[in-house]
Amino acid sequence: MAAVLVAGVTPGVAAARVEASEGPAVIKMRVGIDEGELDKMRAQARAGQKVGPQQQGRAPRTPGDDQRERQPAQKPATAEKQARATEAAAERVTKRNPGAVTAAPPPPVLNEPNRRLLDECFGAPESAPGMGRIHNRFTHCQRIGVEAEYWTIRNGVPVEKEGTTTATLELFTQTDDKQRRARQWARIQRDSVDYDWGWWDNIWLAPNVPLTIIGQCRESFSVCAASGGGVTFPWAYWDNQTTWQSWDVYNKPGSGVGRDVISYNHEYVELFTDFPPFVTIKRGESPQRALRCDSATYFRHGTTTYPHACVFAEVTPRAGFTTDPASNYYLVSLHILQAQDAPNQTYPRLVPDGVPPPRDKRIPGKYIAGDENAPGLHRISPQLHPTEDKENDAHKNGACYGTGIYADLYRDIGLPVPPDTSIPDECDEYPMGSTLEGAAHPDWDFSVKAVPRSHNRAAGGKVRVYYVDDRILQWDYDLEDPFNSNDRFYVHVQ
């Protein structure tokens, strides 16, 4: 098997707040219809005439569409804490370590969903009950039931339920790595609509009732906005077509904070039947998905840059390494595995050999499913963090080669035999030198080991690609509560 880097892909919910956090197992909406108008429609049906409104296509967006659920932007630290706790709880609920997909730049956002991503996402298990599938940091999909109750209204009060229409809603959302936006697609799954209005109304009335779907964002207009109006078709039309309807949810840079202009918002779709003589009493809403948007300037592959992007915030990213000998860096994977699972067997030692150690070595970065408190890693770079980068390198050289300003610090506890550069070997360190938790971090330990230069450089190249493909932001000291607000990632060895 070829070596790959993977991104973790599970959202979740606090077990004690399953219904509130997961969203409904079924989207429920309630619609009223004037009793007199209902009698007219039934009379028309008996006379063989078309009944009810036959509204089709995209309706204008109304002021009300932009006024519902208007909330201020979340603080990055708050959003980050919620996302981590959410994922951990989901893994406890599902009692499994969910699968992962290869981290890769998302395909361009087009008018239709990407067929490969569509098949991959809907073909994988749900990330958590009722939450659909957060496939990776750029993709979400969900099939969820819809239940629409229709009531007669007398003097403005619902008095009698006339019928229930049920269906399956399909949602697919892809975020962008060129703009601060997410494109939502929605449709009713073909042949999923059922009517429970009575045999006559099931044939002549219920299929002609219109259903409107519209994309929305939860936060205030200063944070995000959804483009496009509602799409309205009779239930029978929705049930017999496969066309996807789409909306764009834009996040506004003015709502962002920090060096990378980070902002959070939530996207969802609404369902309703507001078309005379129908009036929706309770709109249906899909579960809301959290997005993190940024305008970091340092993401690039070659000459291609990715200056803006949004990703799904309820994903804990993890770089995956394989120990398969077919990979060109598996010896680095074995070193990481040892550092994570048997840190006391690694160099540098805490004390010289033969001296009882005062404690166990503590090396961060291992992905532990369901543990939102597991210590992760944070990305740095020579350009933005020159001091930390230089110090990581100096400590590595002292522990591995016995050279540099920290040579005495690691005397008798560093690597007994330095890498033989004539073979050629190199020094591999974990956590990586490109992380805040690297060799110089005062609160964490690290490991060094001699590995073939080809393996070390291949692994380093994979990590650099992973940072871009999974949109790992670099550490920002100025964010509120930086250890919760900054991107945290893990390394998962399989």
Image (tube, rainbow, N blue to C red):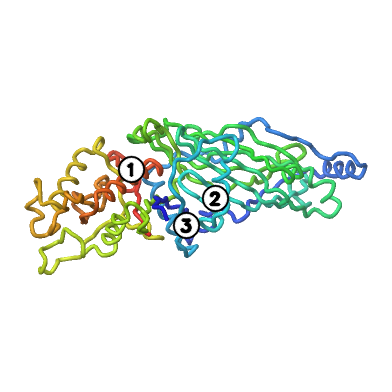
Q: Is residue 121 left or right of residue 206?
A: left
Indicate which disc, 2 or 1, sits on the residue closer to the N terminus: 2
Mark 3 lies on a secondary structure that is loop
Dot 3 alpha-carbon crowd within 10 angstroms: few under 14, some 14 to 19, many 20 or more: some
Foreground residue among 372 and 115: 115
* Residue 85 locus on image (x, y percent): 41, 55
Report how far apart the C-alphas of labels 3 and 2 lie in the structure: 11 Å
Q: Is residue 179 left or right of residue 281?
A: left
Mark number displayed over residue 99: 3
Indicate which disc, 3 or 2, sits on the residue closer to the N terminus: 3
Indicate which disc, 3 or 1, sits on the residue closer to the N terminus: 3
Report how far apart the C-alphas of labels 3 and 1 lie in the structure: 23 Å
Query: Taking 118 as reference, is 228 above or below it?
Result: above
Q: Which residue matches tag 2?
A: 121
Report how far apart the C-alphas of labels 2 and 1 lie in the structure: 26 Å
Foreground residue among 427 and 371: 427
* Residue 247 locus on image (x, y percent): 58, 36
Q: Quadrant of the N terminus?
A: bottom left
Q: Which residue matches tag 1?
A: 464
Is there CB contact under 8 Å for labels 3 and 1?
Answer: no
* Residue 479 locus on image (x, y percent): 31, 40
Dot 2 alpha-carbon crowd within 10 angstroms: few under 14, some 14 to 19, many 20 or more: many
Is there CB contact under 8 Å for labels 3 and 2?
Answer: no
- Three-letter amino acid code at the position of disc 3: Gly
Foreground: disc 3 or disc 1: 1
